[in-house]
């Protein structure tokens, strides 16, 4: 109903985060900005009724690649600001919770109609529902675990 | 339904940002992140045209997977190069990046 307005808002967020990559002084913040633009692109896929592609974009690029990049970059930091650490933790929890939220929305949509590419995978979603729920829970636990690991090996500076 | 022109516009904007960053930036890592933005724009264009086609078939999905594979390989190679350069103490400025040779 409000898809054009939502598309405009998400597009603005994506362009701002894309530009802000090159204004950040630390690579860590640039990677976080790239993750935000990945999330915005997955929202665009969702607006275009391509829920399966949105899910894969969120799983592979936000959940996998961006986390991999953040961990690789943060391994170089010996000291980190306490407020920045809290921000990273909150962002990790919100991102991991967005997996379950998106999955719930996709499951709701595929039970009624299966538009776009998800028509090939609608039955697979229903058949492998417990496996996907387990994957979402594992991703959530992995995000919390990564925050705990960073907390253990990085000295916090208040 | 989103007009196709909007999707092409956002893709053009992202590609412009990426190309401008590749031309202007001197940090090697930032240039690789800019290339990632260009890949993302191409995926959005692919999905946008897919949404407007009447009978796209599974080959479009394979095409998107190909773009994703190249983008994922680029991120993994970026991480490997970053760790390598950081361990050897190389500078990330491409203007003085003369030691990074085969």
Image (spheres, coloured by chain):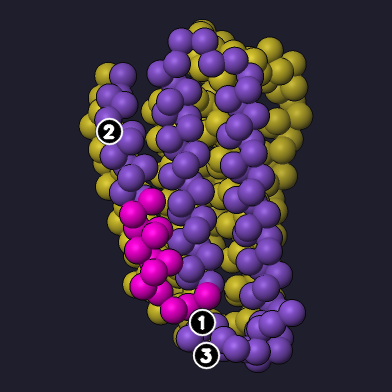
Chain colours: A yellow, B purple
Q: Does the magenta stretch include residue A40?
A: no
Residue highlighted by disc 2: B6
**Residue A24 sits in quarter:** bottom left
Check contact, mark 3 vs mark 1: CB within 8 A: yes
The reply to whether discs 3 and 2 touch (Cβ–Cβ < 8 Å) is: no
Q: Quick check: B8 left or right of A158? A: left
N-terminal of the two: label 3 or label 2? 2
The verdict on a common chain for dots 3 and 2 is: yes
Where is the N terminus of chain B found, in terms of image quarters? top left
Horizontal and vertical percent position of residue A87? 46, 66
Counting from the top left corner in percent of width and height, residue A38 is at 48, 48
Q: Where is residue B35 in the image (x, y as percent from the top left)?
A: 50, 58
Q: Residues within 10 Å of mark 1 (few under 14, many from 20)?
A: some
* Magenta stretch bounds: B15-28
Q: The residue tagged with tag 3: helix, strand or loop?
A: loop
Decide if residue A32 is in sight here: no
Q: How far apart are marks 3 and 1 (CA)?
A: 5 Å
């Amino acid at each position: 109903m409000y898809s054009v307005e939502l598309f405009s808002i998400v597009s603005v967020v994506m362009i701002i985060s894309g530009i802000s990559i090159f204004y950040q002084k630390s690579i860590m913040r640039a990677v976080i900005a790239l993750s935000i633009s990945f999330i915005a692109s997955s929202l665009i896929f969702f607006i275009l009724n391509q829920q399966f592609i949105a899910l894969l974009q969120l799983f592979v690029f936000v959940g996998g690649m961006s986390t991999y990049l953040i961990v690789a970059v943060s391994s170089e930091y010996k000291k980190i600001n306490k407020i920045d650490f809290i921000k990273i933790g909150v962002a990790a929890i919100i991102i991991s919770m967005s997996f379950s939220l998106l999955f719930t929305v996709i499951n709701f949509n595929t039970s009624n109609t299966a538009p776009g590419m998800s028509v090939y995978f609608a039955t697979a979603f229903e058949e492998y529902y417990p496996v996907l729920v387990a994957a979402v829970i594992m991703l959530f636990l992995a995000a919390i675990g990564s925050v705990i690991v960073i907390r253990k090996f990085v000295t916090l500076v208040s | 339904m989103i007009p196709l022109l909007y999707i092409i516009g956002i893709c053009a904007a992202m590609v412009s940002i990426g190309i401008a960053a590749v031309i202007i930036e001197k940090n090697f890592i930032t240039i690789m992140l800019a290339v990632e933005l260009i890949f993302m724009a191409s995926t959005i264009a692919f999905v946008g045209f897919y949404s407007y086609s009447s009978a796209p078939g599974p080959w479009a999905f394979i095409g998107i997977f190909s773009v994703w594979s190249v983008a994922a390989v680029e991120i993994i190679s970026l991480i490997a190069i970053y760790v390598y350069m950081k361990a050897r103490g190389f500078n990330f400025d491409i203007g003085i990046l003369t030691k990074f040779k085969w």
